[in-house]
Image (spheres, rainbow, N blue to C red):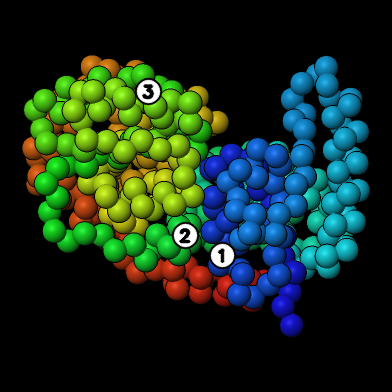
Amino acid sequence: MKKNFLITTGGSGGHVIPATIFYEHLSGIANLIISTDKRGVKFLEKKKFNIKIIDTPKLNNIFTLPYNSIKVLYLILKCLYLLKDKKINKVFSTGGYMSLPIILAAKILGIKIYLIEPNQVLGRANKFFLNSCTKIFCYTGDLKNFPDKFRYKIVVISPLVSKKIYNIDLPIQKRDKFCILIVGGSQGAKFFDNSLKESILKLSKKKQIKVIHQTSKENISFLNDFYSVNKVENQIFSFEPNFSNFLSQADLCITRAGASTLAELSVLKIPFLAIPLPKSKDNHQLENANFYKNNGCCWIIDQSNFDTKIEEFLVKIIENKNEYIKKKKNLEKLNFQNTWANVNQKILGILNEN
């Protein structure tokens, strides 16, 4: 008889995507619910996931604190009922303030709690619940901001990547044009839209390139027109569940440093140029990128140096084939024995033991 598990996640793509991958890993052994807030629903296919919306308010505004505190108390009671009604055996969380009512309710009911930390820096919500969790799944044993007294709870797994990513067949034949994929994250990056297009245009005068550019829905027509008028072969898209279709075409990716995007690029052995988001919480994007840079898998440019360096940098990457090939080989080494089956076996083994 299948058990009943609940996965709670925040509202950003950085929280939701790892939660959906964990959902995939657990779908064979349990009946599953995934809970998120109204922001997170857009990242979930309603036909694929059993979704429960729990719209937790932030508690960081002194003026709304009294009202929001009462709402959180109400949500805890609602979650207590949900967990008991659905006979939930285990709760999993990828962090975010949205997880607060579910985790507190699980703690009250004595339900085992497992945390998932996709970044190289321990998130604040996950840190808050370390004392209550059974295990925390991480991509490294050297997680930043992690209290030493809880290190015994760490379970190191390969970065979470959807099963369909492992199954992508990359073309063996060399392409006519060097394909650059630009990824600004689940919301699209305005900075990339404003600062990259001119550099890409200048690069296209020197090298045969194709650009695949992720942007916001509002900016798709503008970027498509810009590249097309300037005779740069392009594909423009917004957030796309079938992101793998674009990944399979890329020779190089210019990206922020969200954990899920970097994990997918790593598995597919696509070298990338990371421009970490300067204002990311606890500077976690820089630490995410540094993990791959320290393994010789990517390049990093600080956003403050972006305009002056990017065109020159891209020319060097395309021309210096030895450096590019070295990055691909290092990605191959990093992903040795990284398969869907191995990650799945590790996760299920831990749950059976604990």
Could you tell whether 293 is left or right of 151 in the image? Answer: left
Where is mark 2, residue-wise? 162
Residue 99's image quarter? top right
Could you tell whether 223 is left or right of 68 in the image? Answer: left
- Asked whether residue 152 appears in the rendered view, the answer is no
* Up/down of 216 relative to 148, above or below: above
* Up/down of 263 relative to 152, above or below: above
Q: Tell me the amino acid under the disc marked 3.
A: Phe
The picture places residue 218, in percent across and down from the top left corner, at 48, 26
The picture places residue 119, in percent across and down from the top left corner, at 50, 45
Which of pointers 2 and 3 indicates the residue nearer the eye?
Answer: 3
Label 2 and label 3: CA atoms lie apart by 31 Å
Where is mark 3, residue-wise? 222
Q: Tell me the amino acid under the disc marked 2.
A: Ser
* Up/down of 34 relative to 221, above or below: below
Label 1 and label 3: CA atoms lie apart by 36 Å
Residue at 58% over, 73% down: 348
Element marked by disc 2: loop
In which quadrant will I find the C terminus?
A: bottom right
Residue at 61% over, 43% down: 42
Where is mark 1, residue-wise? 24
Q: Earlier in the sequence, mark 1 or mark 3?
A: 1
Label 1 and label 2: CA atoms lie apart by 8 Å
Residue at 71% over, 42% down: 37
